[in-house]
Amino acid sequence: MTMDDSKDSATSPIIAQSPPPQMPQQNSDGFSLKKAGERICEAASTDSPGLCAFILTIISYLLIIATFPFSLCLCVKVVQEYERAVIFRLGRLLKGGAKGPGIFFIVPCIDSYRKVDLRTVSFDVPPQEILTRDSVTISVEAVVYYRVSDPIAAENNVEDYSHSTRLLAATTLRNVLGTRNLAEILSERESISATMQSSLDDATDPWGVKVERVEIKDVRLPVQLQRAMAAEAEAAREARAKVIAAEGEQRASRALKEAAEVINESPAALQLRYMQTLNAISAEKNSTIIFPLPIDLLSHYMKSGNGNGKRKTKSKKEDVLSDDE
């Protein structure tokens, strides 16, 4: 045996007794189980339809191909210019948003769609018995105009957007008018309508509904209140009529005073006024004409008559005195 062989034989048992280091079995198994659990959770949390949905989709496409072209009657759909179609595939909203207007395709057996009308819709709010802030019971009717602005939100966020909007309009009408006085309700309809419109629009925005206009249609008052308001209005009108008549008489008296002053400055003006009056009377074809005789013309005769009367009384007195003597 050589010296090299003795060295190899001496060192070989030492190499065989030193195995390579290994990871503990318990730690590696725990780490792999943790990662597997995370992957399962991620797979469950994804929005993938799953294997069953994939198989149903493949079968549906095969049936369409097998029955072509008769399957086009079920696959091709049409919506009008004012409509949109919201498509659901196996209960899930199809990507791409609402379809339309025009032609669109669906896959029978796995697709379902709903049409949404985008035109403006109007409805009457039923009469609401409302107690105003000044404790007056009134009945109010209103009209609401709305349209669908987001078809997907209208189908997914609310069960029946039309019925929900009607109920919300009735409650909003009661809430808004309950904070106003009767005089404000009767005189400020435009501001009340604007307040209701903004409130309804904010509430229906998550539903994809746009409230365009709200109008107060009718306000009905109790019969007794109507009579009281009518009596109050009549009294106010009579008071205003008396004031207006008094003001008119005052202005007329001032005008007559000014006219008398003008006529007094020119006596001939009175004669012209008499002639104008005669002309107006003769135009009506009357058989009887009343001619106003100026008092100035008779003043001379009246003075002369008074002088003769005084003279006669003096002569009578003188005769009586002579007889007494």
Image (cartoon, grey):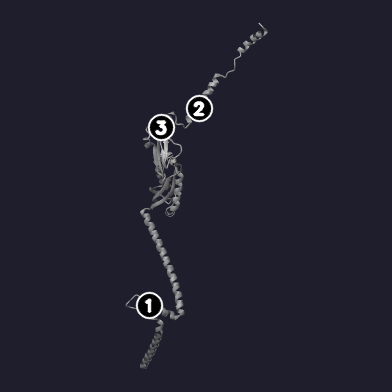
The amino acid pointed to by label 3 is: Tyr
Residue 18, position in %: x, y? Answer: 61, 14
Where residue 157 sits, quadrant-wise, is top left
Q: Quadrant of the N terminus?
A: top right
- Distance, label 3 to label 2, CA atoms, is 31 Å
Identify the residue at the far top of this view.
Answer: 1
Given this view, does label 1 or label 3 mark the residue nearer the observer?
3
List the residue tagged with mark 2: 39
Q: Are marks 3 and 2 in contact (CB under 8 Å)?
A: no
Compared to 157, does 251 lie above or below? below
Residue 83, position in %: x, y? Answer: 41, 43
Q: Are marks 2 and 1 in contact (CB under 8 Å)?
A: no
Secondary structure at badge 1 equals helix
The amino acid pointed to by label 2 is: Arg
Q: Which mark is residue 61?
A: 3
- Distance, label 2 to label 1, CA atoms, is 118 Å
Q: Which mark is residue 279?
A: 1
Q: Is residue 206 left or right of residue 6?
A: left
Q: Quadrant of the C terminus?
A: bottom left
* 10 Å crowding of disc 3: few (<14), some (14-19), many (20+): few
Secondary structure at badge 2 equals helix
Query: Which mark is first along the chain, 3 or 1?
Result: 3
* 10 Å crowding of disc 1: few (<14), some (14-19), many (20+): few
- Identified at 44% across, 53% down, the residue is 190
- Distance, label 1 to label 3, CA atoms, is 107 Å
Query: Which mark is first along the chain, 2 or 3?
Result: 2
The amino acid pointed to by label 1 is: Asn
Given this view, does label 3 or label 2 mark the residue nearer the observer?
3
How many marks overall? Answer: 3
In this rendered view, identify the residue nearer to me: 216 or 44.
Answer: 44
Where residue 167 sits, quadrant-wise, is top left
